[in-house]
Image (tube, rainbow, N blue to C red):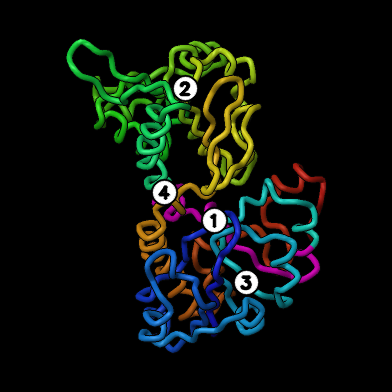
């Protein structure tokens, strides 16, 4: 079986799905790994490291598509990628299909693609192994990003996240008490910020209180409490996610307008459409824009900014499931693995996520 690793070039993407060590774990099981030249360079994994582990280096993306049974990507499939794919291929990637175009659906149908979304792969207990590790990493980047732009002259307000005696710390509001929100809360608390976490799941809020004690304030989320907390926040983090579906727009333009001028809004939910009426995707090369006087940071591939750490973490977790595919073949691996089965968007062109039928009015047979 051939596993293909593509070199992502859009959106300033620097991550790679599989490191040389990850590739070697497949090669020693008798599999072939085909790597597009440069795929790992931005994460510190030059072509020679893959060659040393027994992988094949090719220079054209088209050759990777043509020779691969299993494609490994980081960015979602788009219309151009689907044109290059071979009928019946399997691809694992972060697809976020709820925000894809109808043309992508049509391509999946036409070419009978099996698409596994790494962000919706799920264990029997409901945990999502790949999304969890990516969310933990994303949450830890939040104070780095917020601290940079909050103090940045001339855009920022010149505010430090922490404090010194006699000076109040920055107020941080986090919407969502899941993995991203919890990871971010831990990081902000460690810097001395005043942290408020909002969620409508009391059990999740209780977990954060047990973890961080009185260093964080938990608040039940509704429109009133969201609007009130945004009004005094120096930093707002949106960490809301609905599995395989669009994120609800809980923040209105009026709420953003009511925030402090030059405060920071970081929308980790932008991958699934975003939480605010003012959210629009940006790139790492030009990550911010100002709307209603608030600095917005809405980068979909945010962990690409820490590409080496992210690539190693992703490869470590993904390798377990790739080994199952290598040992049993894709069909049996999907049949036997709850995680892979739950990650299916499409199976040979057939839609496996009914919510998408209702959302787009398109039925994949």
**Residue hosting label 1:** 12
Return the x and y of residue 258 as percentages of the image width and height: 56, 12
Cα–Cα span, label 1 and label 4: 23 Å
Cα–Cα span, label 1 and label 3: 25 Å
Q: Residue at x 35, y 75 (%)?
A: 21
**Residue hosting label 4:** 132
Of circles 3 and 2, which is in front?
2
**Residue hosting label 2:** 263
Numbered disc 1: secondary structure: helix
Mark 3 surroundings within 10 Å by alpha-carbon count, few (fewer than 14), some (14 through 19), many (20 or more): many
Numbered disc 4: secondary structure: helix
Of circles 4 and 2, which is in front?
2
Magenta-highlighted residues:
107-134
Q: Give the mark nearest the N terminus, 1 or 4.
A: 1
Cα–Cα span, label 2 and label 1: 26 Å
Return the x and y of residue 303 as percentages of the image width and height: 44, 50
Numbered disc 2: secondary structure: loop
The reply to whether residue 336 is in sight is yes
Q: Give the mark nearest the N terminus, 3 or 2.
A: 3
Q: Which mark is residue 90?
A: 3
């Amino acid at each position: 079986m051939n596993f293909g690793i593509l070199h992502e070039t859009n959106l300033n993407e620097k991550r790679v799905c599989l490191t040389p060590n990850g590739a070697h774990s497949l090669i020693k099981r008798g599999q072939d790994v085909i790597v597009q030249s440069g795929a790992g360079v931005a994460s510190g994994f030059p072509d020679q490291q893959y060659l040393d582990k027994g992988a094949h280096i090719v220079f054209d993306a088209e050759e990777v598509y043509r020779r691969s049974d299993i494609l490994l990507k980081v960015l979602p499939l788009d219309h151009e990628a689907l044109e290059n794919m071979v009928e019946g291929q399997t691809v694992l990637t972060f697809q976020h299909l709820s925000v894809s175009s109808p043309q992508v659906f049509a391509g999946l149908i036409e070419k009978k693609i099996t698409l596994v979304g790494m962000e919706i792969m799920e264990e029997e207990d409901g945990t999502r192994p790949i999304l969890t590790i990516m969310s933990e990493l994303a949450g830890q980047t939040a104070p780095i990003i917020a601290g940079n732009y909050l103090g940045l002259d001339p855009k920022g307000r010149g505010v430090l996240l922490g404090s010194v005696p006699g000076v109040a710390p920055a107020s941080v509001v986090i919407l969502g008490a899941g993995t991203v929100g919890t990871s971010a809360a831990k990081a902000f608390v460690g810097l001395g910020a005043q942290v408020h976490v909002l969620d409508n799941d009391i059990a999740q809020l209780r977990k954060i209180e047990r973890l961080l004690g009185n260093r964080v304030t938990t608040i039940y989320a509704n429109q009133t409490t969201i609007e009130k907390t945004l009004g005094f926040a120096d930093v707002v983090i949106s960490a809301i996610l609905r599995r395989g579906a669009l994120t609800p727009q809980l923040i209105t333009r009026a709420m953003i307008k009511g925030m402090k001028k030059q405060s920071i809004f970081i929308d980790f939910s932008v991958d699934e459409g975003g939480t605010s009426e003012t959210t629009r995707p940006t790139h790492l090369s030009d990550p911010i824009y100002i709307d209603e006087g608030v600095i917005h940071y809405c980068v979909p591939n945010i962990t690409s900014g820490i590409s080496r750490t992210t690539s190693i973490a992703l490869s470590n977790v993904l390798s377990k499931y790739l080994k199952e595919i290598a040992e049993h073949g894709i069909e049996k691996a999907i049949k036997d693995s709850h995680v892979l089965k739950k990650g299916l968007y499409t199976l040979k062109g057939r839609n496996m996520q009914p919510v998408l039928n209702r959302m787009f009015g398109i039925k994949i047979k």
